[in-house]
Image (cartoon, rainbow, N blue to C red):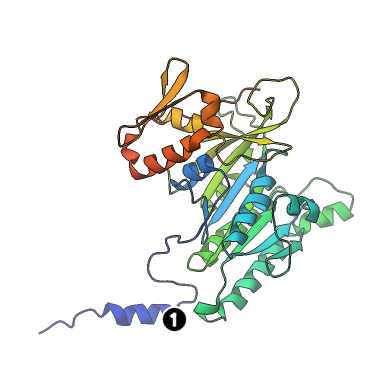
Amino acid sequence: MTTKPFDISKFRKSITKSIDGISIGFNDPTDWISTNNYALNYLISGDFKKGVPLGKVTTFAGESGAGKSFICSGNLVRHAQEQGIYVVLIDTENALDEAWLHALGVDTSENKLLKVNMAMIDDVAKMITEFVKEYKTLPADDRPKVLFVLDSLGMLLTPTDVNQFEAGDLKGDMGRKPKALTALVRNCVNMFGDLNIGMVATNHTYASQDMFDPDDKISGGQGFIYASSIVVAMRKLKLKEDEDGNKISEVKGIRAACKIMKTRYAKPFEGVQVKIPYETGMNPYSGCVDLFEGKGLLAKEGNRLKYQLADGTELKMFRKEWERNEEGCLDQVIEDFTKHPHKQSSTPDAVTEEE
């Protein structure tokens, strides 16, 4: 008796037709949005130009003033718009002023950005679900690329929070809220997987009470971290330097100590400090010198740092000259290392959290 061969094409058609929400094949990201910092891009994605992907959920978590909104609602939104990606900005803190967004280069016109003010987790979930349903009714070729920016997850409320407040009970909904946040992120990951839609969210952290695990904890619990595709933890340190890098007593900005807690595109648990001066904003090359030193690409020779290009040419400069990218030295290293990544010798953590 001859056995009839298994028809995989028929099976594929059958399950895609009978099971709602299933997709066949791989959903590797094709669109990436820069954080406007080469070192941070590299640690997140393994590429100096890429940053965060569409089709995934990325979370930046940190204390107040650590630069989360600056990167997410500012840099990422601006670069997304430059790539023709439509942005839906969900403001749960009522803190994102139009003048501030304009100062960061964000286009707030309706054909580029939709700003929504929401406070309830359930309302955010409903809005995103309705958006995706409407999105799927469009022909595939007419579907725009979309980025949701949720700033922030930590300020979202549950119905219990509201009911308790109205009753004068301020205990908070500590039981349901972490589960609701996890469910929100997990469902977004599932919905966006095969669509040109991504989400970037900010979240809050709180000090650890565990002496054996001193790292700050992210609101929402471990389930939230498991649900997110990429997680970047941020700490705020004081920036006491002038424009030339000289030490001064006045605080001129912040040093955002970024640590990659979760990523599938590069080595996790690496970090970098990114300088964000109040007056000039983030320099795209900030942190690159420390990153390259940590990887053994820049070697000390006297009071200078040296890099040897693949063709044998040596770039030898003082640290401040490297940090200012004089003569395009960092651009040359980025290009050379991208073509010859085997030059890496070690990867210690580049973040040192000292005041």
Indicate the position of residue 215 as horizontal and vertical percent values.
58, 32
Residue at the disc numbered 1: 18
Q: How many marks?
A: 1
- Residue 335 as seen in the image, left or right of residue 231: left
Q: Which of the pair 309/184 is nearer the observer?
A: 309
**Residue 183 in view (yes/no):** no
The quarter holding residue 30 reads: bottom left
Residue 312 sits above or below residue 302 on the image: below
Residue 296 sits above or below residue 197 on the image: above
The quarter holding residue 281 reads: top right
In which quadrant will I find the N terminus?
bottom left
- Residue 227 as seen in the image, left or right of residue 115: left
Report the residue at 69% width, 68% height from top.
127
Indicate the position of residue 194 as horizontal and vertical percent values.
47, 68
Indicate the position of residue 78 as horizontal and vertical percent values.
64, 55
In which quadrant will I find the C terminus?
top right
Q: In the displayed image of the protein, which residue is found farthest to the front?
A: 327
Q: Which of the pair 190/60 is nearer the observer?
A: 60
Residue 136 sits above or below residue 70 on the image: below
Q: Residues within 10 Å of mark 1 (few under 14, many from 20)?
A: few
Report the residue at 76% width, 23% height from top.
250
Report the residue at 64% width, 72% height from top.
131
**Residue 139 in view (yes/no):** yes
Query: Which amino acid lies under the numbered mark 1 shown in the image of this protein?
Result: Ser
- Residue 19 as seen in the image, left or right of residue 198: left
Report the residue at 61% width, 46% height from top.
60
Question: For the residue labelled by badge 1, is the local secondary structure a helix, a strand or a loop?
Answer: helix
Q: In the displayed image of the protein, which residue is found farthest to the top?
A: 302
Q: In the displayed image of the protein, which residue is found farthest to the left?
A: 1
Indicate the position of residue 34 as horizontal and vertical percent values.
55, 51
